[in-house]
């Protein structure tokens, strides 16, 4: 009898152990599923931040990169993407665009405008961008002068994760100095006047507080030294005589300083002068002389954070100011074009020239068109064949555009902690024939090239 009881107890204990193990495995699998672990097995990984990795893996947890390397360990329940015949690169950013937005014009200073005011995502076809590897785009406000602030969006993914920054760089045009120069100088002057207005109001408030404190102290000292019988009696307030207006009570000074309002159109320029975090301007130049005009305006404003967008054409003269830009360690954005020196048949590689001079260069498509998006990496390959170093070419389309918008700590390279916004190519990044096969946003496939075999 005792033996039967012991056997039943042992059997029950064994069943409970098996049940607990199954429950633990199920909860572990559920946790792993909830964490959305994805493993990409690639033929080559162009990390940008380090060496390129042949036949490596990328482990992604909850939309962010957790590990990058070779022969990595990962949970058995992870989703595995086999891409051993492909090259994986960071998602690209088109850092200057009006893609899908209405065309109209503004003039003057409109710093309170932002591109996000124009963007209705459901009405914009982002497929031409996504299919060419652009996982994000910096949309710009329209118009000349100082039209407003750029807004950065992902080009695919969940709607609530698309907007990355509604108020990014302040767009400043200097490609028509006859008008733009006056607008830029006037905006800086007006912004400084707004700052001075606030400073004066603060000074007046502080002086009023100081005076009130001194009067209160003086009154308290008088009350201490003067006997109560000698203190003047408090006279009751007399009603006003017929026809007289009642005396207005003297308003008390506010206990806390309330600054006067700053003109919203000039607030971003104020932020530039005050060196607010992340505040920076993107100054658009069409010729070398535009740079000289802009430099003249900024002589009295050396602390204004700014980058340059050089509108390179087939025949541009920016080589004339490459040395000056290099001496400033300027951050410039440009088009990936092989050009010719003006009035000559001699070919030029302006991007390589700017980098050699000491500039940091980010590249952007030459226009908002499917053709230019498609030719973007082809033009980059042309620059590389003409002498641009591979490392410089890759950074110019990956890390540096993200740095221009201040987001390089989260995007632009494949390394731990960054978002898993990735692009899969069927060849090398500098191979003009390489095509985009897959685009990943936050570790999930957002776009995939159609199967040509299935289409036949």
Image (spheres, rainbow, N blue to C red):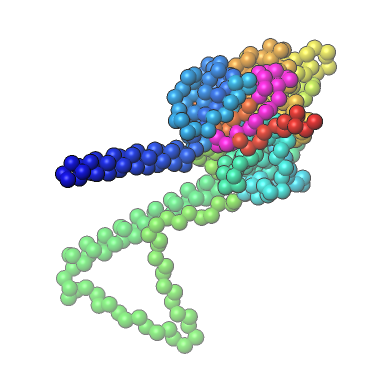
Q: Is residue 396 above or below residue 277?
A: above
Q: Is residue 72 left or right of residue 216?
A: right
Q: Is residue 240 above or below residue 206?
A: below
Whether residue 426 is in magenta: the answer is yes
Q: Position of residue 361 (x, y in %)?
A: 63, 23
Is there any visible trace of residue 299 in the rendered image?
A: no
Total tally of numbered discs in the picture: 0
Whether residue 69 is in magenta: the answer is no
Is there any visible trace of residue 279 in the rendered image?
A: yes
Image quarter (top left, top right, bottom left or bottom right) of the C terminus: top right
Magenta region's main secondary structure?
Answer: loop
Residue at position x 42%, y 55% in the image: 257
The residue segment tinted magenta is 425-444
Closest to the observer: 8 or 316? 8
Residue at position x 20%, y 45% in the image: 5
Q: Position of residue 230 (x, y in %)?
A: 19, 74
Q: Quadrant of residue 19?
A: top left
Image quarter (top left, top right, bottom left or bottom right) of the N terminus: top left
Residue at position x 83%, y 14% in the image: 344
Closest to the observer: 127 or 98? 127
Closest to the observer: 402 or 456? 456
Q: Position of residue 108 (x, y in %)?
A: 70, 45
Q: Residue furthest bottom?
A: 242
Q: Position of residue 318 (x, y in %)?
A: 71, 21
Q: Quadrant of residue 246?
A: bottom left
Q: Is residue 35 above or below residue 252?
A: above
């Amino acid at each position: 009898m005792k033996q039967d009881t012991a056997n039943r107890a042992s059997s029950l204990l064994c069943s409970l152990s098996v049940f607990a193990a199954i429950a633990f495995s199920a909860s572990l699998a559920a946790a792993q599923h909830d964490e959305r672990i994805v493993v990409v097995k690639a033929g080559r990984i162009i990390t940008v931040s380090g060496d390129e990795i042949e036949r490596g893996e990328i482990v992604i947890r909850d939309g962010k990169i957790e590990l990058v390397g070779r022969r990595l360990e990962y949970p058995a329940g992870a989703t595995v993407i086999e891409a051993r015949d492909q090259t994986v690169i960071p998602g690209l950013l088109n850092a200057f665009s009006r893609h899908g937005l209405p065309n109209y014009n503004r003039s003057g200073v409109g710093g309170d405008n932002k591109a996000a005011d124009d963007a209705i995502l459901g009405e914009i076809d982002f497929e031409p961008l996504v299919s060419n590897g652009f996982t994000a785009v910096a949309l710009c406000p329209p118009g000349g002068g100082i039209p407003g602030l750029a807004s950065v969006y992902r080009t695919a993914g969940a709607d609530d994760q698309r907007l990355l920054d509604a108020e990014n760089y302040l767009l400043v045009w200097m490609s028509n100095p006859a008008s733009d120069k006056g607008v830029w100088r006037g905006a800086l002057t007006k912004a400084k006047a707004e700052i001075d207005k606030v400073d004066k109001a603060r000074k007046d408030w502080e002086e009023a507080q100081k005076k009130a404190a001194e009067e209160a102290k003086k009154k308290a000292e008088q009350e201490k030294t003067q006997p109560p019988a000698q203190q003047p009696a408090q006279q009751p307030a007399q009603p006003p005589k017929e026809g007289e207006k009642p005396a207005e009570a003297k308003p008390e000074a506010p206990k806390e300083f309330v600054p006067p309002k700053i003109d919203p159109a000039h607030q971003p320029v104020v932020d530039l002068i005050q060196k607010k975090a992340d505040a920076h301007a993107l100054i658009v130049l069409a010729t070398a002389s535009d740079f000289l005009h802009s430099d003249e305006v900024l002589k009295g404003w050396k602390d204004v954070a700014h980058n340059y967008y050089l509108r390179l054409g087939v025949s541009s003269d920016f080589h004339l100011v490459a040395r000056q830009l290099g001496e400033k360690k300027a951050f410039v954005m440009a088009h990936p074009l092989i050009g010719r020196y003006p009035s000559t048949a001699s070919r030029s590689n302006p991007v390589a020239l700017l980098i050699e001079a000491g500039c940091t260069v980010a590249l952007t498509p030459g226009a908002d068109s499917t053709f230019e998006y498609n030719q973007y990496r082809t033009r980059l390959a042309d620059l590389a064949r003409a002498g641009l170093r591979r490392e410089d070419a890759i950074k110019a389309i990956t890390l540096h555009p993200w740095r221009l918008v201040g987001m390089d700590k989260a995007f632009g390279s494949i390394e731990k902690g960054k978002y898993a916004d990735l692009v899969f190519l069927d060849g090398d990044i500098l191979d003009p024939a390489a095509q985009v096969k897959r685009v990943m946003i936050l570790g999930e496939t957002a776009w995939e090239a159609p199967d040509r075999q299935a289409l036949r």
